[in-house]
Image: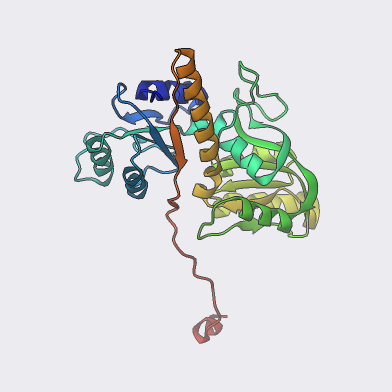
Amino acid sequence: MTAPTLADVVAVLDGLYPPGTAEGWDAVGLICGDPAARVAKVLFAVDPVADVVDEALDWGADLVVTHHPLFLRGVHSVAATTFKGAVVHRLISAGVGMYNAHTNADAAARGVADALADAVGIVERRPLVGPDGGGPDGDGLDGGGAQTGIGRVGRLAEPTTLGEFAQRVADALPPAAQGIRVAGDLAGTVSTVAVLGGSGDGFFDAVRAAGADAYVTSDLRHHPASELRERALFEGGPGGTPYLVDTAHFASEWPWLRYAATDLTAGVEAVLAGRGEAGTVTCKVSTRVSDPWTAVVHVQESPARKDQQ
């Protein structure tokens, strides 16, 4: 069996998640690694943190593919005296490459948005914001007929309550300290759902325009969330929508890793077969939780607290 080169693997990844579709502020692609090196094992993770590097080295990975970039802004040094420089040194010393697909993977077919939509049970979906910046009324198709764009919106197979839907989200995603935060009437009906992996409170207008009953995303800030819900209540009464389902950032993007691992394996095998070679690559999804939050302390009644009331 032939192991592909790093150049082969990068070509497949670039085909799945075209770098040109990344946002202008983003930094995607190969971070370190020799294109001529052979790649037999690939580890997929959300974050390029030291704990993930530990896992990669322990497993004997040849390449680590992460969603988030290690370097989002320009740097003047990768000395091992810095925490990010230490990551690079450890990888290069072990002969391990690193690649990241960020906003280009968010929007891609079978990318972060599609994986999250599948995880929470959205069918008949379309992009929340199409590749041209348009709303969900467009088909959002790329040149190959696949749907691309930011987020996804569609319907549930059967309507449910907000409380039941929030529990479905919690069951579908890896556990995180914050749990699942919900804004809205837990008995309210949810039929149409919008999702966006990662930070999503910049897309509230698109969610409203799509007529979503609930919006699943991460990192919701107080003021945007408060204003969205106040407007919903003002315009729609107690049942005003959209409701909000706020997940941990790490958790909302994690489902994509399994899709990426499957698609890279198939892509590599196709490339090698096209050259008349029999070979593959072994992919693994990281088991490390890279969410930075480690605990939640719940409010409890105390004599001091009662005195403040």
Quarter in which the C terminus is drawn: bottom right
Whether 288 is drawn above or below 303: the answer is: above
**Residue depicted at x 66% and y 24%:** 140
Horizontal and vertical percent position of residue 65: 41, 35
Quadrant for residue 284, please give it.
Answer: top left
Quarter in which the N terminus is drawn: top left
> Horizontal placement of 3 versus 37: left or right?
right
Q: Is residue 76 visible?
A: yes
Q: Nearer the viewer, residue 114 or 182?
A: 114
Whether 217 is drawn above or below 69: the answer is: below
> Horizontal placement of 202 versus 154: left or right?
left
* Chosen colour scheme: rainbow
**Residue depicted at x 46% and y 64%:** 295
Horizontal and vertical percent position of residue 287: 45, 49
Q: Nearer the viewer, residue 233 or 167?
A: 167
**Residue depicted at x 49% and y 23%:** 269
Horizontal and vertical percent position of residue 289: 45, 52
Q: Is residue 19 visible?
A: no
Horizontal and vertical percent position of residue 256: 54, 39
> Horizontal placement of 269 versus 60: left or right?
right
